[in-house]
């Protein structure tokens, strides 16, 4: 039922071969627990994604200033940097 | 002089009366951490130099005769998923072991301007996922009341630091009970504010529709003092909100109507815990508050609902830890971009984080979305409606915090579902986005038991009033 290899790949998570059975068993148990939700009658009920009723919140785009100094602090955390940019492996041949 | 038993008010008055300096009080806490924290491990990092510098600034102000801000000179601990500029911020995860925060979170900026002193960063379950702090990549925190037991989680380091007098107060974050359950296990006060009452800008997102930041303190007055500093709308967090003008303010003792949901006093609860919670409530009844039984019928589905919605949001929010922008990375190894993602995340994330990412990915995946994610969002509506109906009849709801007192280290870590059940009374509150405060109400076998006080959206003032009343009666 729970295809761990497929889901792990979708989630971009590497798994060791010996971990697969363990995760499949645990996730199976969690899904069994979650199955309880099928008992609830949700006919005609709308979904909730926001609990305090806010919607369409805007702010002016020029309100938040960006500084050179902040940029260098952010880049300092990146594993590979080149010419002030974060370096990524080739994605196009 | 040992200054580590004080409250925020005590610090404030002591500084004004010149009984001690900010430097002396900060040094007392640093010394206590040095001595005690090897046993408890509440802190992941201690900011000694920064704290002493903040203290010196305050002492200078006092010397110049300038007015003191409300939190001035009170040293605090900050959960390690909240950014303090220039300090390491790991969220208890190996993937961020060397991450240095490039800016201050809004709550940190607000605390700074209120005169706070930051002692260090508090241990937590990795990315706030857990109920025991055993999921920290940097070792478990121990409960100061019994070192063989967990402090609760995920804000276990914050709660333990307050309980062990290793700080005056702390900040934590609460997605399904992560401030309240550890506050209860360690015997301190904790508040999960109304969703949106406190800005989350600069806190590492776990489940964005549920996350809130809140204080952990030694008493109710301190909790209110910290909350008043950190609350309020922030342009940098679109979900944050100002308190409505029509406030749910204070009430007379005899006007107070309190509901006890029968679903929270039924199967699974330790009878000794239930007895203490009921006896605390009986004390306000004796003062004239009206107590009635109510029902929150969909609460029994809240935990299942939570594990779908939270995990789905986790799977999206944690996609940013990809080994490219920051953190532990396989970027310098051979291989294509996909292999870097796979390896960085495999090496950097612990088991519980990977379980939840996979669960969320599954719930959102093609063919399962309607049956899991959408259905859970609809059940969330039913849970929220239960609370609305209840608050039409009563002002506040009171419940236990967790079915048991603090459990032993190692007792539940191998069985995720059993671990999840320790949040059964706290999760529904996040689903509805309402505020809840937890305060100690007694002990069973020398272990603290908490009482949970829940109110409607933006009713913090009324919750503090009731909590203060109970604190004085206990």
Image (spheres, rainbow, N blue to C red):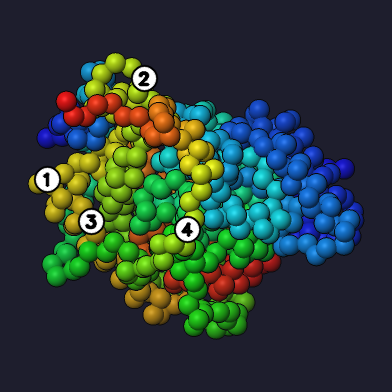
Image quadrant of residue B127? top left
Asked if both marks, 2 and 3, belong to the same chain, the answer given is yes
Judge left or right: residue B183 versus residue A32: right
Tag shown at residue B366: 1
Judge left or right: residue A89 versus residue B112: left
Residue A26 placement (x, y as % from top left): 26, 32
Residue A70 placement (x, y as % from top left): 51, 44
The residue to which callout 2 is attached is B332
Q: Is residue B397 visible?
A: no
How much space separates mark 3 and mark 4, taking CA atoms? Answer: 36 Å
Closer mark to the observer between disc 1 and disc 3: 1
Q: Secondary structure at mark 2?
A: loop
Chain label for disc 3: B
Chain label for disc 1: B
The extreme left residue here reads B367
How much space separates mark 2 and mark 4, taking CA atoms? Answer: 34 Å
The residue to which callout 4 is attached is A64
Q: Nearer the N terminus, badge 2 or badge 3?
A: 2
The residue to which callout 3 is attached is B376
Chain label for disc 4: A
Judge left or right: residue A5 versus residue B175: left
Residue at image coords 54%, 43%: A69
Toward the viewer: A80 or B150? A80
Closer mark to the observer between disc 2 and disc 4: 4
The crowding category of the residue bearing disc 3, from other C-alpha atoms within 10 Å (few below 14, some 14 to 19, many at least 20), is: many
Residue at image coords 19%, 35%: A10
Asked if both marks, 1 and 3, belong to the same chain, the answer given is yes
The extreme front residue here reads A83
Screen quadrant of the N terminus of chain B:
top right
Asked if both marks, 3 and 4, belong to the same chain, the answer given is no
Residue B314 placement (x, y as % from top left): 33, 44
């Amino acid at each position: 039922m729970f295809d761990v290899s497929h889901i792990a790949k979708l989630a971009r998570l590497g798994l060791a071969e010996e971990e697969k059975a363990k995760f499949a068993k645990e996730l199976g148990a969690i899904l069994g627990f979650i199955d309880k939700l099928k008992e609830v009658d949700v006919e005609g009920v709308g979904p909730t994604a926001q609990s305090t009723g806010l919607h369409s919140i805007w702010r002016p785009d020029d309100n938040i200033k960006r500084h050179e100094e902040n940029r260098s602090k952010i880049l300092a955390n990146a594993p590979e940097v080149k010419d002030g940019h974060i370096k990524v492996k080739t994605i196009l041949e | 002089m040992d200054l580590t038993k004080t409250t925020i008010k005590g610090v404030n008055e002591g500084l004004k009366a010149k009984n001690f300096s900010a430097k002396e009080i900060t040094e007392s806490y640093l010394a206590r951490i040095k001595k005690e924290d090897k046993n408890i491990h509440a802190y992941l990092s201690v900011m000694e130099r920064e704290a002493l510098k903040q203290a010196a600034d305050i002492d200078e102000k006092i010397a110049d005769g300038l007015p003191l801000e409300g939190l001035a000179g009170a040293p605090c601990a900050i959960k390690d998923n909240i950014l303090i500029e220039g300090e390491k911020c790991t969220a208890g995860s190996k993937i961020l072991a060397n991450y240095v925060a490039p800016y201050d979170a809004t709550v940190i900026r607000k605390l700074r301007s209120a005169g706070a002193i930051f002692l260090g960063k508090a241990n937590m379950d990795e990315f706030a996922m857990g109920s025991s702090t055993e999921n920290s990549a940097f070792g478990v925190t121990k409960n100061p009341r019994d070192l063989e037991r967990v402090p609760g989680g995920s804000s276990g380091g914050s709660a333990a630091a307050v309980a062990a007098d290793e700080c005056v107060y702390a900040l934590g974050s609460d997605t399904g009970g992560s401030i309240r359950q550890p506050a209860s296990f360690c015997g301190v006060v904790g508040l999960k504010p109304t969703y949106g009452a406190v800005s989350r800008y600069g806190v590492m997102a776990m489940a964005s529709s549920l996350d809130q930041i809140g204080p952990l303190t030694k008493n109710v007055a301190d909790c209110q003092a910290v909350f008043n500093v950190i609350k309020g709308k922030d342009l940098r967090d679109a979900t944050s909100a100002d308190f409505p003008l029509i406030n749910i303010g204070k009430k007379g003792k005899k006007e107070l109507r309190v509901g006890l949901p029968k679903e929270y006093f039924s199967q699974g609860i330790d009878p000794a815990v239930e007895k203490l919670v009921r006896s605390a409530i009986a004390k306000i009844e004796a003062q004239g508050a009206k107590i009635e039984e109510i029902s929150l019928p969909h609460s029994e589905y809240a935990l299942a609902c939570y594990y779908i919605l939270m995990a789905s949001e986790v799977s999206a929010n944690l996609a940013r830890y990809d080994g490219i922008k920051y953190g532990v990375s396989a970027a310098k190894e051979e291989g294509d971009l996909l292999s870097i993602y796979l390896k960085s995340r495999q090496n950097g994330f612990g088991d519980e984080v990977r379980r939840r990412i996979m669960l969320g990915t599954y719930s959102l995946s093609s063919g399962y979305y309607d049956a899991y994610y959408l259905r859970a969002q609809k059940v969330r509506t039913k849970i929220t409606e239960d609370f609305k109906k209840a608050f039409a009849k009563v002002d506040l709801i009171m419940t236990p915090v967790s079915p048991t007192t603090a459990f032993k280290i190692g007792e539940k870590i191998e069985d995720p579902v059993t671990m999840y059940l320790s949040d059964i009374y706290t999760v529904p509150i996040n689903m509805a986005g309402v505020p809840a405060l937890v305060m100690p109400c007694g002990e069973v076998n020398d272990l603290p038991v908490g009482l949970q006080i829940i109110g409607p959206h933006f009713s913090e003032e009324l919750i503090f009033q009731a909590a203060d009343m109970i604190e004085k009666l206990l």
